[in-house]
Image: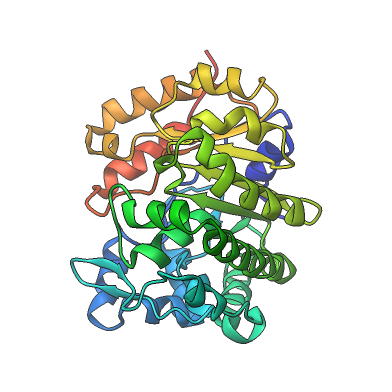
């Protein structure tokens, strides 16, 4: 039994004294002990070394009173497992030397045996669960098929994902084949994470908001929903679509346990769009963590009051930024932990 199951209670829709809190990308990035590792290990070495990934996962847990841990990894380990040689370049970010551009490229991609290609992730889960000692839940995650496709076709990060979108519109057969292969790999990957002991999984649709509401229903949501359908009988599934508030009504009809929302949607509207029946997660602007601790505390309190304490998980509206002062991150977490009803 997990000692602090506040996060799981929120996913189950149970009444709680206060909302649970964790922060997207809390494992690493803004922590000095994580940055100190960069001199010794490159990014994907940290992902692929179970001892390092486990240690990074624990870093924020040792510092802050968080209600959940999220395994340190990266969404691009899935396309790497499928044979795409992504690297992380300094000053550039994700980089793929030979992006996917044709139907033939897609046909040559294999749906791998995740036990062979992603075993290091599952080993990291085992090590992390030992360290957590049932204190708090561990979250596993993956990128949405659309978000993964964006990187595979674009070959690097982008603001508008024009190359990826053009690929889909010009070559829909190739696009849907690639999306399906990513979906099948992701389902197998997340199922294995559940077997290894994670308490919930989150699907990050980081670039879903680059699609129109109509195209979202063609190229993103159907594939996310396949993942939800496959995993929901096994565990809690959280879907986070950045910039995808327009799809909240559709998402609410799914078997997801919770929906993440970003800072572009008001709590009241998010509640209305989800018929006041769905656990919501979010939606503090990560840049707002540059405010003073006093301002952060006030804004977080207001955020909780607007969402309501039940069926709610306090979080950021996207990942924490690398330059956030530790005392500001702590102010965010403490504001939730110390929250009291009016």
Instruction: Say if residue 1 shows up in the picture.
Output: no
Residue at the spot x=75%, y=56% of the render?
Answer: 230
| Residue 268 horizontal/vertical position (percent) | 52, 16
Instruction: Say if residue 91 shows up in the picture.
Output: yes
Q: Quadrant of residue 297?
A: top left
| Residue 99 horizontal/vertical position (percent) | 37, 72
Relative depth, front residue between 84 and 254? 84
Residue at the spot x=67%, y=30% of the render?
Answer: 278
What count of labels does the image hold? 0
Relative depth, front residue between 141 and 323? 141
| Residue 49 horizontal/vertical position (percent) | 46, 83
Relative depth, front residue between 208 and 16? 208
Above/below status of 86 relative to 164: below
Residue at the outermost left position: 91
- The way the protein has been coloured in the rendering is rainbow
For the N terminus, the image quarter is bottom right
| Residue 5 horizontal/vertical position (percent) | 68, 46
Residue at the spot x=68%, y=64% of the render?
Answer: 187
Residue at the outermost bottom position: 116
Does residue 216 appear to the left or right of 34 in the view shown?
right
Does residue 227 appear to the left or right of 220 in the view shown?
right
Residue at the outermost top position: 342
Residue at the outermost right position: 233
Residue at the spot x=44%, y=75% of the render?
Answer: 47
């Amino acid at each position: 039994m997990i000692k602090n199951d506040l996060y799981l209670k929120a996913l189950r829709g149970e009444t709680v004294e206060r909302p649970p809190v964790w922060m997207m990308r809390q494992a690493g990035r803004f922590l000095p002990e994580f940055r100190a590792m960069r001199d010794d290990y490159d990014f994907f070495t940290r992902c692929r070394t179970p001892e390092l990934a486990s240690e990074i996962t624990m870093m924020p847990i040792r510092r802050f009173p968080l209600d959940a841990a999220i395994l340190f990894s990266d969404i691009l380990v899935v396309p790497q497992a499928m044979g795409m040689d992504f690297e992380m370049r300094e000053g550039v970010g994700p980089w793929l030397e030979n992006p996917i551009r044709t139907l033939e490229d897609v046909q040559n991609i294999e749906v791998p045996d995740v036990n062979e290609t992603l075993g290091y992730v599952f080993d990291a889960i085992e090590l992390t669960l030992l360290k957590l000692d049932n204190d708090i839940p561990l979250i596993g995650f993956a990128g949405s098929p659309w978000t993964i496709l964006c990187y595979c076709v674009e070959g690097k990060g982008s603001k508008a994902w024009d190359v990826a979108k053009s690929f889909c519109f010009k070559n829909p057969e190739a696009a849907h084949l690639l999306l399906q292969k990513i979906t099948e790999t992701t389902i197998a990957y997340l199922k294995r994470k559940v077997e290894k002991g994670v308490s919930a999984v989150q699907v990050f649709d980081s670039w879903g908001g680059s699609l129109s509401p109509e195209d979202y229903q063609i190229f993103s949501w159907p594939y996310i929903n396949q993942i939800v359908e496959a995993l929901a009988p096994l565990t809690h599934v959280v879907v986070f679509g950045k910039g995808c508030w327009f799809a909240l009504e559709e998402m609410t009809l799914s078997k997801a346990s919770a929906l993440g929302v970003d800072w572009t949607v008001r709590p009241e509207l998010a509640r209305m769009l989800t018929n006041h029946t769905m656990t919501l997660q979010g939606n503090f602007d990560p840049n707002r963590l540059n405010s003073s601790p006093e301002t952060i505390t006030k804004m977080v309190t207001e955020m909780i009051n607007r969402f309501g304490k039940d069926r709610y998980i306090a979080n950021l509206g996207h990942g924490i930024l690398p330059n956030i002062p530790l005392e500001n991150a702590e102010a965010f977490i403490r504001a939730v932990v110390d929250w009291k009803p009016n």
